[in-house]
Amino acid sequence: MENDLKILLTIADRPIAEEIQLLLEKSGVHSLLTSDNPASSVMQIIGGATLGSSENLTLQVHADDYKQAVEIVNQSPYWDLFI
């Protein structure tokens, strides 16, 4: 399955990444959000945004849905993330 996934975008802002993921889900495109620093989620829960933990989030979609996902994001307020 991992070979069938394609990176849609990488972003450091979790709320925006989750908003894009929700937008894709509403359009029928399932996605996977992964972090290069899984501990940052725990640190945010414990200390809130004040800890300033950094992480890069990767939003991946199935290769068959990639073109549709790009179109969805391009027609959203987040289109500039592809520039």
Image (tube, rainbow, N blue to C red):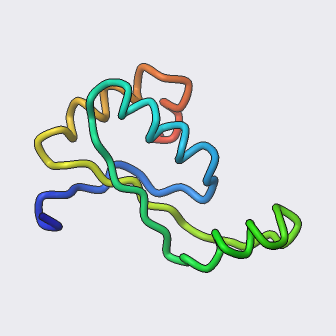
Query: What is the quadrant of the N terminus in the image?
Result: bottom left
**Residue at the top extreme?**
75
Q: Quadrant of residue 7?
A: bottom left
x then y, percent, for residue 42 = 67, 74
Please give the name of the residue rendered at 18% of the width and 49% of the height, measured from the top-left corner: 62
x then y, percent, for residue 20 = 48, 38
Asked whether, in this view, residue 61 is left or right of residue 19, the answer is left
Q: Quadrant of residue 19?
A: top right
Please give the name of the residue rendered at 32% of the width and 54% of the height, measured from the top-left corner: 60
Question: Residue 38 versus residue 59: which sits nearer the camera?
Answer: 38
Judge whether 9 appears above or below 57 on screen. Answer: above
Please give the name of the residue rendered at 42% of the width and 19% of the height, measured from the top-left corner: 75
x then y, percent, for residue 59 = 39, 53
Asked whether, in this view, residue 60 is left or right of residue 17, the answer is left
Asked whether, in this view, residue 26 is left or right of residue 17, the answer is left
Question: Residue 43 versus residue 5: which sits nearer the camera?
Answer: 43
Callout count: 0
Please give the name of the residue rendered at 18% of the width and 38% of the height, measured from the top-left corner: 65
**Residue at the right extreme?**
50
Q: Quadrant of residue 16?
A: top right
x then y, percent, for residue 68 = 23, 29
